[in-house]
Image (cartoon, rainbow, N blue to C red):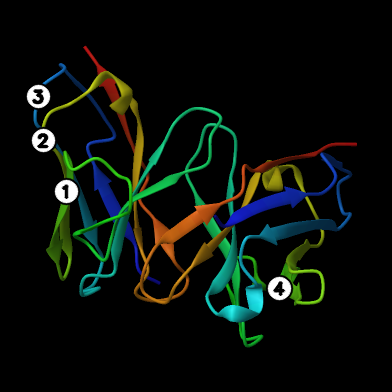
Amino acid sequence: QVQLQESGPGLVRPSETLSLTCAVSGLSISSGYYWGWIRQPPGKGLEWIASIYYSGSTYYNPSLKSRVTISSDMSRNQFSLDLSSMTAADTAVYYCARHTSGWGFDFWGQGSQVTVSS
Amino acid sequence: DIQVTQSPSSLSASVGDRVTITCRASQSISTNLNWYEQKPGKAPKLLIYDASSLQSRVPSRFSGSGSGRDFTLTISSLQPEDCATYYCQQSHTTPYSFGQGTKLEIK
């Protein structure tokens, strides 16, 4: 069974960079598939942030592209998200998930609450 | 960017009712439309992918249809555990986008 687990700081100060990691178990991230990040502000809907293909190709939401970097570490079977210049508007639950081209996000992490506050 | 508009934003129905939620894309997306169920405090769960394919272990009372711009999620006989928020999502083109959500309540 594929499992994903996010980890990162629960609190980030304004203007700082958020770094999140998603550890994958039950499947090698180098075996195929896309691996992505989605966020959900409190009481709001879902927003796709970025995805990385097993080959290393990356895809970003243009609304966040200037501040986002997605990367993978196959030796640790995990992938990561960096989001710079954080503001209160970035306060959200951040999810990592697996997906295939054209199809849905089929395995999700439990989510990581991130609050931006001084 | 492709926008997806979901309706209604909320609805209330009784156990046993047939429930329909619709999603319209701003341009044709073939069948690259997926549906999710999200319960409070939990991650979304994939119900339907590729417009009409039932994800593994999802009850058969859930079904999806449509192609091009217009799509439908149907629950054939509403159960108490179906109380949740439902989202559609287009996977045709990046940036992937989600509908605004439909909050389903049980009368």
Decide if residue B87 is in sight here. yes
Q: Quadrant of residue B74?
A: top left
Dot 2 alpha-carbon crowd within 10 angstroms: few under 14, some 14 to 19, many 20 or more: some
What is the chain identity of the residue bearing mark 1?
B
Residue A68 versus residue A22 in the image, above or below: below
Which one is in front, A85 or A1? A1
The chain under label 2 reads B
Placement of the N terminus of chain A among the 4 image quadrants? bottom right
Q: Dot 3 lies on which element?
A: loop
Residue to which mark 1 is pinned: B63
Dot 1 lies on which element? strand
Where residue A100 appears, as percent x and y from the top left, is 44, 72
**Is A75 located above or below residue B104 in the figure?**
below
- Please name the amino acid that badge 4 sits on: Ser
Asked whether disc 2 touches disc 1, contact meaning CB atoms under 8 Å apart, the reply is yes
The kind of residue tagged 1 is Ser
> To which chain does the residue with label 3 belong?
B
Which residue is labeled 3 in the image?
B17
Estimate the x, y position of residue B103 in percent, counting from the top left. 33, 30
Earlier residue among tags 2 and 3: 3
How far from the left and from the top, in percent, is residue B60? Answer: 18, 43
Query: Gap between marks 4 and 3, in whole Å?
Result: 47 Å
Instruction: Identify the residue under disc 2.
Output: B76
In the image: residue B19, left or right of residue A110: left
Residue A114 vs residue A86, the one in the foreground: A114
Q: Which residue is mark 4?
A: A66
- Compute the Cα span from label 2 to label 1: 8 Å
In the picture, residue B85 is in which quadrant? Answer: top left
- Which residue is at a point 25% across and 73% down the rendered structure image? B29
Q: Amino acid at mark 3?
A: Asp
Both on one chain, marks 4 and 3? no
The mark that comes first in sequence, 2 or 1, is 1
